[in-house]
Amino acid sequence: MRENKILKKIWMLGICLLVSSVLVGCYSETALTDDSVPTPTPTSPLQEKLTGDPHVEVFEVTQYPSAAKCAPCHEQIYDEWRSSNHAYAAISPMFHKFEQKLHSLAPTKGAFCVRCHMSVGTTLGEPRDMPLWKRAQVSREGVTCITCHRITESYARGFNGMRRITPGDIHQPIYGTRTGEGVKHVVENKEKYKVATNKNETGVAIHLKGIKFEQLDKSEYCASCHQVAIYAGIKLEVVYEQYLNSPALKKGITCQECHMGLVPGEPKGYAKGPVAVVNGIPIEPDGIHANHAFYGPGYPITHPGVFPHHKEGERFDMQTWLKFDYRAGWGTEEFEEKLENGDIKVDFPPEWQEIDDRFDARDIVTSNIAELEKKRDLRRRVMENGSRIDGPFFESRPTTGKTFNFSYKITNIDLGHNLPSGSLGAQPELWFNVALIDPDGVNIWESGYLDSLGDMCDLHSYDVRAGKIKHDDQLFNLQTKFLTTNVKGTDREMYLPVNLDADQRPIIRPNNFMNSLMNHPPFVRMEGRSLPPLGYRYAEYSVPSELMKKKGTYRLASRMRSRAEPIYFMRFCDATPEMEQAMNEWMLDIHPYSVEFEVE
């Protein structure tokens, strides 16, 4: 069916071209007046400042090249990067919801968040609240190629993402971990490699120099975005500070070795591979290949047409993609056949009326979902390589009619940072889920279970607060949370460091004294539960005697579970139901296993 539609489309296109050629011939003598030429609409703050300058748009596009411009020679790196958390930094709908909520509570923070998440957009002067679909493509790429490879100055922690990206078109130097001998060789033999060394030449555009940047392969290079603090002195990113106190630092292991190396989460060297493939010819084929997937536990919850980045997907703008109902099966053979046979009726938006567009979009979505499944495997590997679960350990022989006490040992075997780590402001979740199955296959007891929204049943659960589900008294949860001071001096957990009891206008205010006096901001502190490098903790459980009724073979099923955000926090930030659904769908299970044992 799809082939017939394509042939029909080609036939119609031929008719249109014939008609248009006739029209052009008829009207070729007609002069265009000034009024007939539409005035371009400014698309960015820089263009608004310089409206009328015909070079502005060219400057934006050429001086800050998109990752797609690098892909022809660095296809493997582009494919690794396009589904990475770095590539997702600007697109994440949860980031935008969180950032807007934070801005409403701390309106003086300005571009604090977007300096890291959209560094090129910030450099271009795009305002923090600019809609994503109005931003430049390179801005939507988040931490893109030039975010790291056009930095020429060394920075340390404390800069909070304020790094200068050196402007320049695709032919200007790129800064990396090599001395640029490969680039020099290609440029000197440009006819052989069919590359363009300036805009007037034909071929694959290439940068003319590769310059070694000493800090790029060192851990401190990551610090300016992965160790940041915001009002009122709260550390939202803490991983670099943890690294400075870790065994990894003492052993000389860098962040890059574990997060860009051969094995996710382990310092076992780098893969071998060419630095580039220019028109099919590998350059330095036995060189070091750093994986630009940037292994980590995070994952996207946006529309799979929007992310991962896809060069073919850019033909549809973001708002058009958001109208494509991939869950309903648009663009699949089964769906389109049902539609053609009249078995279903769909009122398509104008952008998706054409069947060929739906077929093309489905191909892109299918490709992107396959990339996300690869990412899921990398997430699992990096988490399992950095943790270990031992047990269960029984306090005594399990017996009917008696309380059953047991435990598991949870160990952070990662040398570099805590488990979990990363952005404490987003409160990433890592908890232990264990269930006891009786001889009849019935789940008689569980901890780490979820409520109707998918949240753990702690004090923040909507269902627990409404009395719809029992509080999980034995929950083992490594999630770090904020503690705020109440009017009378007691503490309580809060999603963000906002004191709602003492201030009728909730706002995060700057401190009026130095944090070093108390070692934390006034009225706010962090309830740290994560495990330090090589640290461990026992998850201890007790099953009531009245549940141990039957003799026979029981089974303990256990797993660690990882999720990027709690659902209650997403609702606090006004997330959509679709965002909540995706957050739960891509939740990760780590070290799942079960143990059978006899109860006498």
Image: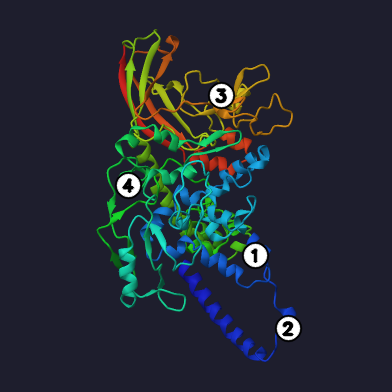
- The residue indicated by pointer 2 is 33
- Measured as percent of width and height from the top left, residue 507 is found at 68, 34
- The residue indicated by pointer 1 is 47
Q: Are marks 3 and 4 in contact (CB under 8 Å)?
A: no
Q: Given this view, does label 1 or label 2 mark the residue nearer the observer?
A: 1
**Nearer the N terminus, badge 1 or badge 2?**
2
Distance between mark 1 and mark 2 Cα atoms: 25 Å
Q: Is residue 356 visible?
A: no
**Nearer the N terminus, badge 1 or badge 3?**
1
Q: Nearer the viewer, residue 454 or 565?
A: 565
Q: Given this view, does label 1 or label 3 mark the residue nearer the observer?
A: 3
**Nearer the N terminus, badge 3 or badge 2?**
2
Q: Name the residue located 63 percent from the left edge and 50 percent from the top edge.
A: 128
- Measured as percent of width and height from the top left, residue 353 is found at 60, 64
Three-letter amino acid code at the position of disc 3? Met
Q: Name the residue located 41 percent from the left edge and 52 percent from the top edge.
A: 371
Judged left or right of residue 209, residue 573 is: right
- The disc placed on residue 276 is none
Three-letter amino acid code at the position of disc 2? Thr
**Nearer the N terminus, badge 1 or badge 4?**
1
Dot 2 falls on a residue whose secondary structure is loop
- Measured as percent of width and height from the top left, residue 497 is found at 61, 30
Dot 3 falls on a residue whose secondary structure is loop
Q: Nearer the viewer, residue 167 or 114?
A: 167
- The residue indicated by pointer 4 is 261
Q: Name the residue located 66 percent from the left edge and 42 percent from the top edge.
A: 108
Judged left or right of residue 204, residue 577 is: right
Q: Residues within 10 Å of mark 4 (few under 14, many from 20)?
A: many
Q: Is residue 329 visible?
A: yes
Q: Given this view, does label 1 or label 4 mark the residue nearer the observer?
A: 1
- Measured as percent of width and height from the top left, residue 494 is found at 60, 28
Q: Name the residue located 33 percent from the left edge and 57 percent from the top edge.
A: 178
